[in-house]
Amino acid sequence: YDSAVKYINRGSLEPFTRKVSYKPGDPKPVNACIVVLARNHDWRALRESMKQMEDRFNHRYNYPYVFLNNDPFTDEFKNMTRSMTSADVHYGQIPVEHWSYPEHIDQEKAKEQRKKMHEKGVMYGESESYRHMCRFESGLFFKHEIMQQFDFYWRLEPGVQYLCDINFDPFLYMKERKIKYGWIIGIYELMDTVPTLWDSVKKFVKTHPDLIPEHNSMWWVSRDNGTTYNGCHFWSNFEIADLSFYRGEQYTKFFEFLDREGGFFYERWGDAPVHSIAAALFLQKEEVHWFDTWAYYHPGWQHCPRGDAWIQNRCTCDPDDRDKTITNADWGKCSHEWALLPDTPLEYRKA
Ligand code: GDP
Ligand code: MN
């Protein structure tokens, strides 16, 4: 991993740093939003996330927030979140058909499977709501009415931290470079949650060869040419993406196919492996960006840069933290391996 480590530790400032600011309500160079899925009781943890989001980034850019919930938001939630930002805020309820069982799902079987996964000790194995959440985040959040006006989104969760200043507009950065998907933490999946996901992916590839570009990023998720899934995925609690990626034919068919397979309910397929495998199938390395100069913590792991970026961006995380910083851990090999993914040969480049 020497070259990958050097890549991570190169310590340079973003060459594309461009200081700009926009006021709330100003037209932005990109129609983008910060999207938050949350329950009413999440407001306290969300204020912490918003405090850092605003202080580290959004007080200069004022991108609007979109809050989504399967229940109606309470006035308390609205007041406690609205008061954290000067930017526009939108509150939306998720339509029931995006948070319930599709007709083809055998709910008795789903219940038995939850029980089995719980007995096996699988994380969230018993939870029904977690499955609706994963399915919604996989293929439905961008269909919400409020989301229709936006071209890009940044996903924010309650209880996460941004530990360096973010001095450029990632939406503009991505749009200018035709980057479709941005991530910070790459990690291995708990394979008990997705035992047959890869079989379904293989079936999809077989039935839709026309949708798979000749050169993609498959190597990152499968080292044996598609036979098995190595579990690598982008941790989707942070992601910035171009919504046209999800709204296009490839992803639409991919999600519909997976949804019919039933694994969101009979297993516990997460939106992280689903988004990540889609990115690996449909995107080239150049269309995916690792925001490796940023610092981000979600309970369990953090990413923390080194060098000049750490000093100049006023970072407060510890890159050498053995327990938290994922690039120091075996679990974080996926990130290093992304850096080792060869560039797309010029003759195959889309972007
Ligand atoms: P983890 O990161 O996988 O441990 O899962 P989280 O508990 O952080 O949930 C992921 C995201 O979905 C967070 O933004 C939660 O606020 C949100 N979430 C989880 N379950 C529900 C739910 O039942 N309803 C709503 N509205 N949001 C949920
Ligand atoms: Mn979370």
Image: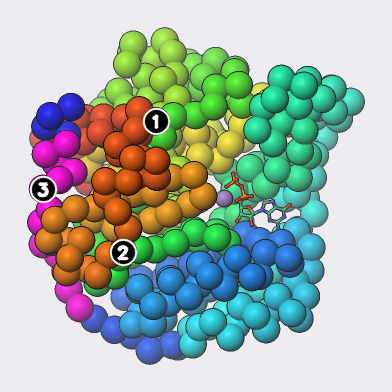
Q: Amino acid at mark 1?
A: Trp
In percent of width and height, residue 52 lies at 43, 71
The secondary structure making up most of the magenta span is loop
Does the segment drawn in magenta span residue 16? yes
Q: Earlier in the sequence, mark 1 or mark 2?
A: 2
Name the front one of labels 3 and 2.
2
> Which mark, by number, is residue 331?
1
In percent of width and height, residue 233 lies at 43, 34
Q: Which residues are magenta?
A: 5-19
Q: Earlier in the sequence, mark 3 or mark 1?
A: 3
Report whether residue 1 is seen. Answer: yes
Q: Is residue 128 above or below residue 26?
A: above
Point 24% across, 53% down: residue: 305
Report the residue marked by disc 3: 10
| Tag 1–tag 2 contact (CB < 8 Å) | no
Q: Amino acid at mark 2?
A: Thr
Report the residue marked by disc 2: 316
Q: Secondary structure at mark 3?
A: loop
Point 38% across, 89% down: residue: 23
Point 78% across, 39% down: residue: 128
- Distance between the alpha carbons at the discs numbered 3 and 1: 21 Å
- Distance between the alpha carbons at the discs numbered 3 and 2: 19 Å
- Foreground residue among 154 and 30: 154
Q: Amino acid at mark 3?
A: Arg
In percent of width and height, residue 215 lies at 26, 28
Q: Quadrant of residue 315?
A: bottom left
Point 42% across, 10% down: residue: 227
Name the front one of labels 1 and 2.
2
Q: Is residue 320 above or below residue 95?
A: above
Q: Secondary structure at mark 2?
A: loop
**Residue 177 horizontal side relative to residue 322, left or right:** left
